[in-house]
Amino acid sequence: DAKTTQPPSMDCAEGRAANLPCNHSTISGNEYVYWYRQIHSQGPQYIIHGLKNNETNEMASLIITEDRKSSTLILPHATLRDTAVYYCIVRPYSGGYQKVTFGIGTKLQVIP
Amino acid sequence: DVKVTQSSRYLVKRTGEKVFLECVQDMDHENMFWYRQDPGLGLRLIYFSYDVKMKEKGDIPEGYSVSREKKERFSLILESASTNQTSMYLCASSLTGGEQPQHFGDGTRLSIL
């Protein structure tokens, strides 16, 4: 699987958009970008995933660059409950069996 | 919404005990997974199952077994608990097919004394 690089920590003011970057310069053609988050002492929560087009759901938007070497997760109006560690991972199209492996992630602190 | 429910949030057991961790999902997912998560070691796959009564070893199956008698339920068994199995245990499930994401439960924090 392609390796991902994320900043270790970020701050965001409550109510503002949080933009979390992820670099995956070695991504291959059949690999998807996934985002999860983990709030302290809870299980990881799936947020969104995409291949090459931008994606949006009720939680967030995912912007993938045209060359697919990086992506940005956008939380449009951050709240205190969005304080968590955010993980960007890449996984191949694999029939769902592929294990999930997290890196260090980005610790997002939403500030009142 | 996908719901993956783990039977206990916190559990304390003694060395040598047989420990059962239960996981139930309500979305008719074919695949189910057991992971453990430890500081500095990240997420490690113990076992997974792609169908009822089917199981496959993950990266660290030693000391564990699993059971999947019904599609919605996947159990992790610690045959004889040891202190090095103190950890956060996470269950996940997913549909079969391509890029389907895994959905996780809230975890069981297990302490072996």
Image (cartoon, coloured by chain):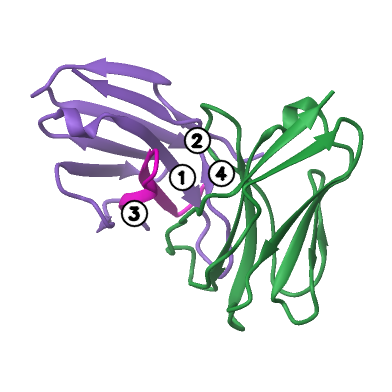
Work out whether mark 2 precedes mark 4 in sequence or the reverse, and give the earlier one.
Answer: 4
* Disc number for residue B92: 1
Work out whether mark 2 precedes mark 1 in sequence or the reverse, and give the earlier one.
Answer: 1
Q: Is residue A63 left or right of residue B107?
A: right
Q: In the picture, which chain is purple?
A: B
The amino acid pointed to by label 4 is Met
Residues drawn in magenta: B27-47
Work out whether mark 1 precedes mark 4 in sequence or the reverse, and give the earlier one.
Answer: 4
Q: Residue at x 36, y 44 (%)?
A: B34
Give neighbour class at mark 4: few <14, some 14-19, many 20+ (Cα, 10 Å).
some
The amino acid pointed to by label 1 is Ala
Work out whether mark 3 precedes mark 2 in sequence or the reverse, and give the earlier one.
Answer: 3
The amino acid pointed to by label 2 is Gly
Work out whether mark 3 precedes mark 1 in sequence or the reverse, and give the earlier one.
Answer: 3
| Of labels 3 and 2, the one closer to you | 2
Q: Is residue B53 left or right of residue A87?
A: left
| Of labels 1 and 4, the one closer to you | 1
Is the C-beta separation of discs 2 and 1 under 8 Å? yes
On screen, A99 above or below A104?
A: below
B96 and B8: which is toward the camera: B8
Q: Secondary structure at mark 1?
A: strand
